[in-house]
Image (cartoon, helix red, strand yellow):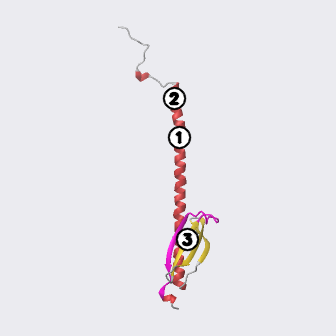
Amino acid sequence: MRSNRSSRPSSDRAFTLVEVMVALAVVSVAVPALLLALSQQLDGTRYLQDRIQAQWVAANRLVELRLVSAAKGTLQTGLITGSEEMAGRIWYWWSEGEETQVPGFFRYEVTVSDSEDGFSTPLHTLDGYLMVAQANRGR
């Protein structure tokens, strides 16, 4: 019997240069796509954090209006602007109040942005209704 040494067993077979180049091409396409997806995920997370903080600022403003109503027995109408620091950042808010058809019942819209000129592009807008306390209205 003659042994055939010219054919190697399949376990000794190595990658060819073409196979290595194809693998590198696949990796070079996949890695940037994964980095882009990760970057978009981080941007989305930051945006959601900003939205949550803007919601807190708007809720704080509505509570402040409720406290003023309880203390003074009246509420301001029209556009009121201000700013508040939360989580190491300055947040700008605009609250606009108007009396409804129900006497002593006010509708407020609180708009919050992270930039001073962000009224047209707010991060969050909160609508709320407040009523002036009956005991204080008769004075």
Say if mark 1 contacts mark 2, CB within 8 Å: no
Q: Nearer the viewer, mark 3 or mark 2?
A: 3
Few, some or many residues within 10 Å of mark 1 (<14, 14–19, 20+): few
Few, some or many residues within 10 Å of mark 2 (<14, 14–19, 20+): few
Say if mark 1 contacts mark 3, CB within 8 Å: no
Q: Is mark 1 on a helix, strand or loop?
A: helix
- Does the magenta segment cover residue 119? yes
* Image coordinates for residue 52, horizontal then vertical, percent: 51, 63
Residue type beneath disc 2: Val
Residue type beneath disc 3: Val
Q: Is mark 3 on a helix, strand or loop?
A: strand
In the image, farthest residue toward the bottom: 139
Q: Mark 3 points at which residue?
A: 110
In the displayed structure, would residue 69 be above or below residue 16? below
Image quarter hosting the N terminus:
top left
* Image coordinates for residue 70, horizontal then vertical, percent: 51, 83
Say if mark 3 contacts mark 2, CB within 8 Å: no
Magenta-highlighted residues: 113-134
Few, some or many residues within 10 Å of mark 3 (<14, 14–19, 20+): many
Give the Cα distance between marks 3 and 2: 60 Å
Residue type beneath disc 1: Val
Mark drawn on residue 31: 1
Give the Cα distance between marks 1 and 2: 16 Å
- Does the magenta segment cover residue 41? no
Front residue of 101 and 139 = 101
Q: Name the residue under label 2.
A: 20
Quadrant in which residue 98 is drawn: bottom right
Mark drawn on residue 47: none
